[in-house]
Image (cartoon, helix red, strand yellow):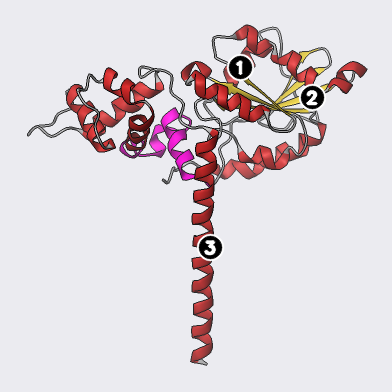
Amino acid sequence: MAINWFPGHMHKAQKEIKEILPQIDVVIEVCDARLPFSSENPMITEIRGDKPLIKILNKSDLADPASTKVWLDYLESQHNVKAIALTTEQPSVAKNLVHLIRKMVPNKDQEGKQINAMIMGIPNVGKSTLLNTLVGKAKAKVGNEPAVTKGQQRIRLEEGLYLFDTPGMLWPKIANENSGYRLAVSGAVKDTAFDHDDIAYFAAEYLLKNYPKRVMDRYKLEELPLHEEDLIEAIGRKRSCVKSGGRVDLHKASVILINEIRDKTLGAISFELPDIIDAENSHFAELEEKRIAAREAKKTARGRGRKNKR
């Protein structure tokens, strides 16, 4: 699926982050707990090296608790990674992040040296709300310093501990195209960037497979639809989205489904698990290899054609 976002600022932001990274001791990434893989920025893996990483699965109140537990265990099995789940209604838990940052770099903390952490996250994962909780009204950003570039903030969390905030960023290309659908369903991408119907069909297919009882209960269905288009049509009829002639307004029904996923009317839902992602990544990597091979074969064929004409 093609999502039309505009990554023109991405290269500049990436350059700025790389410039300050040598000063950073701990990297913090805020992800959406409903889609921890799809909402992570692949750039972080590329540039952080061996620096300690704190993965925050935010909005965990919107995610399936069982799935969140699987993700926390999976992430914590990785080297130098600590994972925690947060909701926007847990300010006290958020403030424990300061202690966790210090714990990730015990040598610096024990020696009383300044600790610099950097927080990153794509738009709409709740990074700003988390920052407001951490910083509070009494704290202020420190500007006009060599380490601070435009679009970034250097915030004093407490004595000897600073937090570098970076702008919310998306990236130019998504290797796993299903991640694009999930980002759109979650609201991480502006509604003008995609087709509601396209996204709703993706969500409907997933819900039928993973949350069938919830779908039937919510829309008072007597039997489970076999296909995603049947579910969208059933939702439309139940919500009186019917045009003249008795045809269902599928667009209106699609918007209803997406909104009810986002506002938790359908309950806590997670859209991916580590094993699903591993299988999808292998699939899309194989497709990409085939596309590259086909492109190279065409180039070779064109080259032979030109030689034969000489």
Q: How dense is the environment of label 3, judged by Cα within 10 Å: few (below 14), some, or many (20 and up)?
A: few
* Span highlighted in magenta in the image: 174-199
Pointer 1 residue: 130
Asked whether, in this view, residue 236 is left or right of residue 134, the answer is: left
Name which residue type carries label 1. Leu
Q: Residue at x 41, y 31 (%)?
A: 185
Residue 187, magenta (yes or no) = yes
Which structural element holds mark 2? strand
Which structural element holds mark 3? helix
Q: Residue at x 19, y 33 (%)?
A: 249
Give the image quarter of residue 217: top left
Which dot, 1 or 3, sits closer to the camera? 3
Pointer 2 residue: 116
Residue 209: where, in percent of width, then height?
36, 32
Asked whether, in this view, residue 203 is left or right of residue 91, the answer is: left
Mark linked to residue 292: 3
Cβ–Cβ below 8 Å for labels 3 and 2?
A: no
Residue 299: where, in percent of width, then height?
52, 73
Is residue 153 in view? no
Name of the residue lying farthest toward the bottom: 310
